Image (spheres, grey):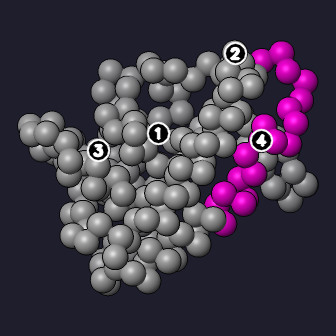
Amino acid sequence: MDALANYRILVANVDALCERIAAVYGNHIKCAPGCDACCRHLTLFPVEAYALAKAVNALAEPLRTELRAEAASTTPEAPCPLLRESTCLLYDARPLICRTHGFPILLETADGTREDHCPRNFQGLASLPGNAVIQLERLNEALATVNALFLQNIPAHPDSGDRLTIARAILLTPLSDD
């Protein structure tokens, strides 16, 4: 059984949504290689962490060993340990939060809802239509569901219940059955 199959489907759906938004508003999106303003040391659901661990394991030596050594000594306040010269080493395997950073998201707050995005993006636009905004609550619910299914299908593991930092994900041993 492929424990990460549901996660890959969710990633594909999120990528498709971001591509649709970029197709219409690409000239308003400043995110590009070299821009690392949002690249922080974030926490991930276990399903995301294990997907990232699989990508780390596929890196060639000595890069994999160097990355793991750096991850072992980094702090939560440091920039993302996957950054090299303002570029993500595992861009194709980046977590959902990294895939959606900069894009317009709909946030639900105690005062209602509001749209947010990177201040460098969408300048000069007074508003965006609903189909150009990522509904964060809905995305988080989908990710939580995918994570719960993932946890049901893997052996018990000390890192399987809590959110993990990207550094911890880099240090994980990938699952053997995916």
For the N terminus, give its image quadrant: bottom left
Classify mark 4: helix, strand or loop.
Answer: loop
176 above or below 110?
below
The residue where tag 4 is placed is 133
Among the two numbered marks 1 and 4 on one chain, the one whose residue lies closer to the N terminus: 1
| Cα–Cα span, label 4 and label 3 | 34 Å
- Residue 10 in sight here: yes
Magenta-highlighted residues: 123-141
Among the two numbered marks 3 and 1 on one chain, the one whose residue lies closer to the N terminus: 1
User: Which circle marks residue 74 in the picture?
Assistant: 3
110 above or below 71?
below
User: What percent of the width, then of the height, locates residue 20?
Assistant: 69, 35
Alpha-carbon neighbours of circle 2 within 10 Å: few (<14), some, or many (≥20)?
few
Dot 1 amino acid type: Arg
Classify mark 3: helix, strand or loop.
Answer: loop
Q: Nearer the viewer, residue 157 or 22?
A: 22
Alpha-carbon neighbours of circle 4 within 10 Å: few (<14), some, or many (≥20)?
some
In-image side of 139 versus 115 (left or right): left
User: Which circle marks residue 27 in the picture?
Assistant: 2
For the C terminus, give its image quadrant: bottom left
The residue where tag 1 is placed is 40
Q: Residue at x 77, y 41 (%)?
A: 133
Which of the 4 image quarters holds residue 105? top right
